Amino acid sequence: MIHSAVFAQQPVRIAIAGLSHGHVHWVFNREGKNDIEIVGIYEEDEALAKKFQENYDLDPSLFYTDLDEMLKKTKPEAVSAFGAISEHLPVVEAAAPKGIHVMVEKPLAFDYDEALKIGKLAKQHNINVITNFETSWYSSNQYVGKLLQDGKLGAVRKVWVNDGHEGPKEIGVGEDFLGILVDPEKNGAGALVDFGCYGANLITWLMKGEKPVSVTAITNQNKPEIYKNVDDEATIILQYPKAQCVIQASWNWPFSRKDMTVYGTKGFATAKDATTVIERLDAKSSEEIKSLEPRPEPYADPFSYLAAVVQEKIDPSEGLYGLPINLTVAQILDAAIRSAQTGKTIVLSEE
């Protein structure tokens, strides 16, 4: 029993696949946490790898320019992908046959066929593939979800999800990350994918995995001089049999926002930010503002969450990170891209 307890406390061995995604800095700035150990870093761009090596004083022996070689030599328990969305499938193809779990940055995919291939690989090789969304850390979203689950909002009728910021270039993201975001081959679209994925993830969770009947999307280039190849403004409408979700994804907000409002047959609740909820649960009551505590560990940190999944302390299958929900997110994004391109509503039941 003593041996088992000691073993359970060992840090999870993880590898990093790619350094171009701006969120990768998180993993190198986790002072005071010892739940993971970085055993290898894959990055083909040697100049970018050298920049990280110097900035974070990393051992040069950690770095590889060949993904398969890194996975074979370092034998990680999990790999976290921080490249373009289009690189998620190749990472899973390399990791899954070796029994290595995978965490990717949102979304899982923008191409539904690629998402299905990822799902097939995960099932075939019995690994977890989880998707990191910042809004999964929000205690406000969990609170609103619990209100709905407990029947305090009634049945869902309308959901509004607003996500985005002033624009990636405007807020100063790194050149490597910007290069991904403005490339439709790597990112699928602009704001539609970058921020539309949050709403698709949240509504699929709230609807307990139910798929929308149809997807309609409208996009625009308000700043074609900056974003000439992708949209910077997108609205996605998801129609369910008795509910509708409007996702407003934008690189044109006056400031950063990630908020959600759920309207039910009894009342409504708004997750205003990570820890603030505005609720009105019946016609006779007034609005109330609630301040919540942040989510406890391991739910407030994606790498702590990944470690808990690998150690089988958490089953991610039903949550916001889980593969079933994120396969549907990919299907919604795929349909939204096609809807915006064709100007037509995509009816999922006809596909």
Image (cartoon, grey):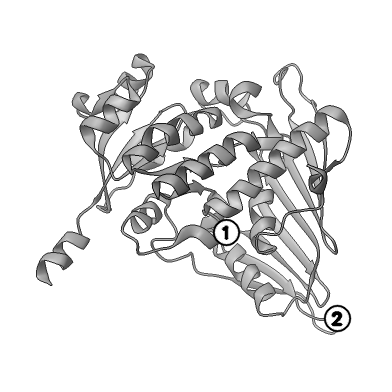
View extreme (bottom): residue: 284
View extreme (left): residue: 2
View extreme (front): residue: 124
Q: Is residue 257 visible?
A: no
Q: Residue at x 45, y 26 (%)?
A: 20
Q: Amino acid at mark 2?
A: Ala
Q: Is residue 333 visible?
A: yes
Q: Quadrant of residue 147?
A: bottom right
Q: Earlier in the sequence, mark 1 or mark 2?
A: 1
Residue 63 image point, x, y percent: 27, 25
Q: Is residue 26 left or right of residue 142?
A: left
Mark number displayed over residue 274: 1
Q: Residue at x 13, y 72 (%)?
A: 1
Q: Does residue 152 sit above or below 309 in this rendering?
A: below
Q: Residue at x 78, y 73 (%)?
A: 155
The residue lying toward the viewer, choosing from 229 and 269, is 229
Alpha-carbon span between mark 1 and mark 2? 26 Å
Q: Is residue 141 left or right of residue 11?
A: right
| Secondary structure at numbered mark 1 | loop
Q: Residue at x 80, y 49 (%)?
A: 349
| Secondary structure at numbered mark 2 | loop
Label 2 near label 1: C-beta < 8 Å?
A: no
Q: Is residue 190 left or right of residue 222?
A: left
Q: Is residue 70 left or right of residue 45?
A: left
Q: To which residue does mark 2 refer?
A: 283
The residue lying toward the viewer, choosing from 52 and 128, is 128
Q: Quadrant of residue 108?
A: top right
